[in-house]
Image (spheres, rainbow, N blue to C red):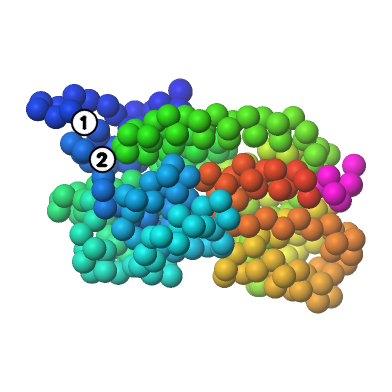
Amino acid sequence: MNLLRPALAVALSLLTNSAFAQTIESCDTSFAYDSPPARAITLNQQATEVMLALGLEDRMIGTAYLDDTIPDQWLEAYNSVPVLSDRYPAREVVLAENPDFLFAGFASAFNDTNLGAEAEWHDIGIGTYVVNAECRNQHPADIRMTTDPIFIDLESIGALFGVEDKADALAGNIRTRLDAAATGASGAGLTAFLFDSGTDTAFSAACCGAPGLLMESVGLENIAGDIEGRWADLAWETVATADPDVIILIEAEWSTAEEKRAQLESDPVLSQLRAVRQRNYVVVPFSETILGLRFVDGVERLAAGLQQLDLN
């Protein structure tokens, strides 16, 4: 199956009496436009960065939910867009802004406790899109993720807003950089534990999500790579038994790398892990571990960090 053009990618069609016609398909829903959206709201940092990278900040009337910091190259554009909420905005807040497009980086944006189902927004004339990596109907928990969702999103959003050339150029640059990082395979022969958060257990990368792909992209062996799913709750005994060569510390607003480092180094058992004793850490921002535009930055950052540790 060609994942770059699946049945649920953006479909182009000619509609009667319309010079512009796009049907954007989001996982298992779709919405038709007869002109590009002009009042978009992004609901997660990943979605926000896609819009900013494509120069679409003038089409944005609001944004929400940062996981970490916006990179310098997009910061000025980001600062020109109103922030509606630190987390997901209330449905009433979104409605008051009169948007015509809602773009989410996580499917949780449209669950019952947040903004409600995408179809409910379609019923009142507002289109939606959730990044392709979140489409569980296309990416089962037991199948390893690839980088294809990054390019599906660029193709979809580029076509919807009529900036295909920018999207194609950005996709080409990302592919080139990913290929270069994979060629180096700086993690070959090394085992790694990705520490996202957690105290009673360790929230880590399982076999088949983007964080697992991040490690595999540089040749690392994930100590939880045999666990089905995108994420895994690991018992600390499992981590201690694996005694990984490298620990990847995720930098996030809700759990900083420094907090996790202190936790490991103060624990009487975990402090004896080789990676902790030798401080074989690589810090990666959360936004670089998911399949957004910054995933390639995460691959490059991880590769460079491993080269600096010089464990091979």
Front residue (pair 130, 164): 164
Magenta segment range? 306-312
| Three-letter code for the amino acid on which mark 2 is drawn | Pro
Describe the element under mark 1 as helix, strand or loop.
loop
- Left or right: residue 85 compared with residue 127: right
The secondary element bearing badge 2 is classed as: loop
Going from N to C along the chain, the mark reached first, 2 or 1, is 1
Q: Residues within 10 Å of mark 2 (few under 14, many from 20)?
A: some
- For mark 2, what is the residue? 36
Neighbours of disc 1 within 10 Å: few (<14), some (14-19), many (20+): some
Residue 124: horizontal and vertical position, in percent?
Answer: 15, 53
Mark 2–mark 1 distance (CA, rounded to whole Å): 8 Å
Which quarter shows the N terminus?
Answer: top left
55 to 70, vertically: above or below: above
Please report the residue visible at 40 percent of the width from the left and 26 percent of the height from the top. Answer: 5
Picture quadrant where residue 144 is located: top right
Any mark on residue 45, and which?
A: none
Q: Residue furthest left?
A: 17
